[in-house]
Image: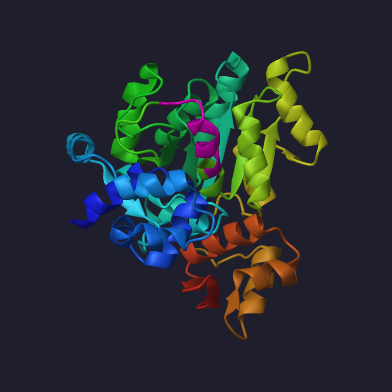
C-alpha cells in the first residue's frame, strides 16, 4: 500500500505511543505491523488481546478514504518518527508520538522553541502578559509553542505570529477548529507556522486527548512558561511533563488573591524560575539577549562566559550534548539553548547522534 496510507492506518490504531514505537522498532515499518499475524503479535510481550485484535482488524477502507480526503482539503501532511525531519528534541522524550499530522511546516529553526501555556479563563493582565511574552520570544528568534486553547494559549500564539513563528499542538485532528472561536487563528498559524497533532484527521477534541497532547507541547520546547494557571489545571500537567523531560519551567507571578495564579505561585515555591518578561526567560536559558536576530553591522563577536566554556570543551574533540551537560553542570535545557544559538551564529556544527563540533572562532 502507499506509504501515506500505511501510516494513516497505523495512526488509526491509536496504540499508546511507547507500544507503537516498540512495534515499529520490532517490525521495521507500519506496513509490516499491519501485515503481522496473530502469532507474530503475540510474541511481542505486553500486547493485550484487545490491541492485537485491533491491529488485525485494521481501519475500515472508508475511514481511510475520508482521512485522505480531509488531508487533501486542508493541505495536511504526515511526519513520522522514522523521518529525518522529525524533531530531534521530541524524539528524545519517553513517549514520542510515532505519527504527527502537520498543517504548515515544521522548520529547522523550530528547534529553538519555548512553550507558553495557561488558563482558558485568564484576566486581562494574563492575556497582556501572554501576548507580550509570545511576541518578545518570537521577535528574538524563538518559536512559541502552545495548545491553541482559548485564553493564554491563543494570546501567546497571536503575539508570536505578529513577529515570528508559532506552533500549535492540538488535542484533535488538525482539520478540526477547537475552540471554534480560534478558527481564524488556526488558519493563520497553518499558513505562517505549523499546526500539529498526533490524533488522526477528523478526530473530535475528546477530553482525554488533552493531557497526552501536553507532553508534545513540552517535548518540543526547551522550556515552558506558565501565565496564570489554577491548581490542578492542564497547564500544570504540561509543567509536570516538562520536568519529567528535563525542560526548564518558568512561572509568571500574579494576584495572590486570584485562584488563577495559585498554580504559578506553587511552581515558584517549588523552584520554578519567576519570570516577568521574555528577557527573563532568555537569561534563565543562558541565551544572550539580543543575539538571535541578524544585526545590520558585524562587530567583533562577543561570547558569554557559558558560550566560551562550551567552545573550550569542543576545542579538542567533538562532544555529545550529555557530556557537555555533565562537564558544565548546566541544565540540559540551558546547554541545548546555547548550542542552538551558537549553531545559528556559525560557531558549532551539529553532527549525527547528538554530538557537536567547534567550527569557528
Secondary structure predominantly adopted by residues drawn in magenta: helix
Quarter occupied by the C terminus: bottom right
Please provide percent x and percent y for residue 65.
17, 39
Please provide percent x and percent y for residue 157.
45, 31
Q: Residue at x 51, y 34 (%)?
A: 134
Please say whether residue 238 is visible from this viewpoint.
yes
Q: Is residue 125 above or below residue 344?
A: above
Q: Residue at x 36, y 64 (%)?
A: 84
Quarter assignment of residue 235? top right
Q: Nearer the viewer, residue 320 or 275?
A: 320
Q: How many marks?
A: 0
Residue 251 falls inside the magenta stretch: no
Q: Nearer the viewer, residue 294 or 193?
A: 193
Residue 208 falls inside the magenta stretch: yes
- Outermost residue on the right side: it is 269
Please provide percent x and percent y for residue 340.
53, 61
Q: Residue at x 32, y 31 (%)?
A: 188
Q: Nearer the viewer, residue 183 or 96?
A: 96
Q: Tell me which segment is drawn in magenta.
A: 205-215
Is 126 positioned to the left or the right of 143 in the image?
A: right
- Outermost residue on the front side: it is 39
Please say whether residue 105 is visible from this viewpoint.
no
Quarter occupied by the N terminus: bottom left
Please provide percent x and percent y for residue 194.
36, 41
Is 89 positioned to the left or the right of 5 in the image?
A: right
- Outermost residue on the bottom side: it is 316
Is 41 positioned to the left or the right of 247 in the image?
A: left
Is 165 positioned to the left or the right of 2 in the image?
A: right
Amino acid at each position: 500500500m502507499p506509504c501515506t496510507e500505511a501510516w494513516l492506518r497505523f495512526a488509526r490504531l491509536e496504540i499508546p505511543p511507547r507500544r507503537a514505537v516498540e512495534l515499529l522498532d520490532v517490525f521495521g515499518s507500519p506496513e509490516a505491523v499491519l501485515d503481522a499475524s496473530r502469532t507474530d503479535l503475540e510474541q511481542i510481550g505486553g500486547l493485550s488481546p484487545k490491541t492485537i485484535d485491533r491491529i488485525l482488524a485494521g481501519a475500515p477502507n472508508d475511514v481511510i478514504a475520508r482521512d485522505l480526503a480531509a488531508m487533501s482539503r486542508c493541505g495536511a501532511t504526515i511526519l513520522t518518527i522514522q523521518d529525518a525531519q522529525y524533531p530531534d528534541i521530541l524524539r528524545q522524550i519517553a513517549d514520542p508520538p510515532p505519527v504527527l499530522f502537520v498543517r504548515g511546516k515544521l522548520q529547522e529553526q523550530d528547534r529553538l522553541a519555548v512553550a507558553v501555556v495557561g488558563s482558558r479563563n485568564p484576566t486581562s493582565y494574563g492575556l497582556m502578559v501572554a501576548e507580550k511574552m509570545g511576541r518578545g520570544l518570537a521577535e528574538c528568534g524563538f518559536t512559541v509553542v502552545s495548545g491553541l486553547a482559548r485564553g493564554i494559549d491563543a494570546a501567546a500564539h497571536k503575539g508570536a505570529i505578529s513577529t515570528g513563528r508559532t506552533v500549535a499542538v492540538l488535542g484533535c485532528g488538525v482539520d478540526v477548529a477547537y475552540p471554534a472561536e480560534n478558527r481564524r487563528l488556526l488558519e493563520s498559524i497553518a499558513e505562517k507556522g505549523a499546526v500539529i497533532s498526533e490524533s488522526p484527521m477528523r478526530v473530535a477534541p475528546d477530553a482525554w486527548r488533552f493531557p497526552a497532547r501536553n507532553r508534545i507541547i513540552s517535548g518540543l520546547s526547551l522550556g515552558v512558561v506558565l501565565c496564570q494557571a489554577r491548581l490542578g489545571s492542564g497547564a500544570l500537567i504540561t509543567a509536570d511533563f516538562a520536568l519529567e523531560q528535563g525542560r526548564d519551567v518558568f512561572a509568571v507571578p500574579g494576584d495572590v488573591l486570584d485562584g488563577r495564579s495559585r498554580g504559578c505561585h506553587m511552581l515558584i515555591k517549588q523552584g520554578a524560575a519567576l519570570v516577568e518578561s521574555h528577557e527573563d526567560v532568555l537569561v534563565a536559558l543562558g541565551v544572550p539577549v539580543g543575539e538571535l536576530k541578524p544585526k545590520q553591522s558585524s562587530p567583533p563577536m562577543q561570547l558569554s562566559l557559558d558560550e566560551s566554556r562550551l567552545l573550550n570543551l569542543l576545542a579538542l574533540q567533538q562532544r555529545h550534548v550529555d557530556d557537555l551537560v555533565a562537564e558544565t553542570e548546566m541544565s540540559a535545557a540551558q546547554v541545548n539553548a546555547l548550542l542552538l544559538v551558537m549553531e545559528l551564529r556559525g560557531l558549532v556544527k551539529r553532527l549525527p547522534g547528538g554530538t557537536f563540533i567547534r567550527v569557528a572562532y
